[in-house]
Amino acid sequence: MESTGEIERYEIRTFDGELGRAVVALTSFDIGEIVMRDYPILSAGAQLKKDSSKLLVDIAKALDQAASVFEGACIPVQLQANIIHEYMQLDEEKRRLIQTEFAVPSLFDGHDIVTVIECLAQTAHDEVSQLSERFTTEELRHLLLVMATNAHEFLMDQELLVGLYLKGSKLAHSCSPKTVYVSEGATLIHCALQPIQPGDLITTNYALSDNIRACWPTPLRREKLLTTKFFECKCERCVGPDDCRIMKCPGCKESAAVYHPTRDEPRWICTNCEGQFEDSTMPLRLESQLEQSVIDATAAFDDIQGVSSQSVQQTFVKLGIIYKTGTQVLGTEHWSMNWVKAFLCASRAKQDAEHAGIMALEFLQWSDRHIRGNLPHIHARYLASFGPYCVRAGLRSEFESLYAAATPWIQARIVGSLDTVHRLQALGDKPTASCSTVEQDASDWLPPVIKAPLASRARKNRRR
């Protein structure tokens, strides 16, 4: 045992192998109970402020010079500059903690992010005299690597920041985590997402920064963690049957062939006919192409400033083609087809509310089967987003059964906001209540360019 916290409700232990130092529960925690409060020893914003000091501007210029070598790479230069500048303001003890108390996974030569960080650290050290006078290149390199692999994001006054948390960084990763965190200013509050028993490893999710990743299958999750956090995930979800990678069975043709990543061939087992199939019998190349098409098409909405109404409609047309082709090849249970279905539901609400409601219900039922058991807070957010479509289509009773199963997680500290809780309660707890109060926010997971037309239609409907 190294240290204890929260009145000795957990402790940090040292484990052999890759796990290293990790947090273990000493008592039990119920769903929604606060496990840990944590405060940053360093935090930095993603953008430079207008009144930035000359030193900070000089650091940013040096990093921008280094980043120019990597053509086409998206390097958050201003964030890195803010990190180095904030590090310079810390006292010696906090700088010592950053250099000694945060794990950096074993790195391999040639990793893209490592190469970039080494270049940034070297250039900043060589070009900014205040840095070279106080720090070695290795110290700056370690700082940037620690932030890349240990930092948590949070919002404060509508500004996105990253923080380095001494206790929170010791929570081990799992794709089916025991906790989820919300921020109250710079304070992170980690709450139990599943019942936790004494002796349990207290885990969190390192890679879940948006709703689409909740649907990702094992290969995509592992690739993301390897490229951003430098480790291959071997959590219980990643070594078990892949609950989001289910394809059409070559034998019975049902959407029931589940991938088992740790089995020797055959890795595909059908839960319907019990047939077993090798990779060579599955449409893996088409699967990869369709997955990338879905990711690329929906990523177009990330650039909100560059998305026009015309391009939105073109994307929806493309998604419709992907869905028609994909369901024929992959079946209806594959993650990619259900994520597309979520977008198509929103796009078709105006033309055919009943069809949109059926699609919304099908997506929520899929999420109930495959997401709720691992990431119940994301599933609850899906209920808040798509529940109104179900209710307007006369599918309230079907929605209420899904709502009832998710009730333990409908808490503000789990779903992220009290507004989401109120919307869910209006849909699930009050059968006679109108859903008009939540219509304009029903698709809060969508980018504003799509939400705006939906909200406009909702206002017109209310006026009518």
Image (tube, rainbow, N blue to C red):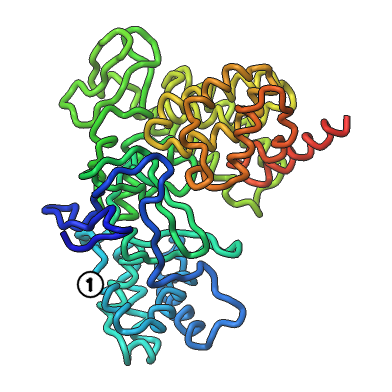
Say whether residue 69 is left or right of residue 107. right
Q: Quadrant of the C terminus?
A: top right
Q: Is residue 194 above or below residue 16?
A: above
Q: Residue at x 57, y 49 (%)?
A: 302
In this view of the protein, can residue 74 be seen by the observer? Answer: yes
Say whether residue 167 is left or right of residue 429. left
Q: Nearer the viewer, residue 390 or 11?
A: 11
Q: Residue at x 26, y 53 (%)?
A: 10
- Classify residue 240 by image quadrant: top left
Q: Nearer the viewer, residue 27 or 141?
A: 27
Q: Position of residue 374 (x, y in %)?
A: 37, 35
Q: Residue at x 23, y 34 (%)?
A: 239
Which amino acid type is marked by label 1? Thr
In the image as oriented, which residue stretches furthest toward the right? 464
In this view of the protein, can residue 293 be seen by the observer? Answer: no
On the image, numbered disc 1 is attached to which residue? 100
Q: Residue at x 22, y 23 (%)?
A: 267
Q: Is residue 435 above or below residue 306?
A: above
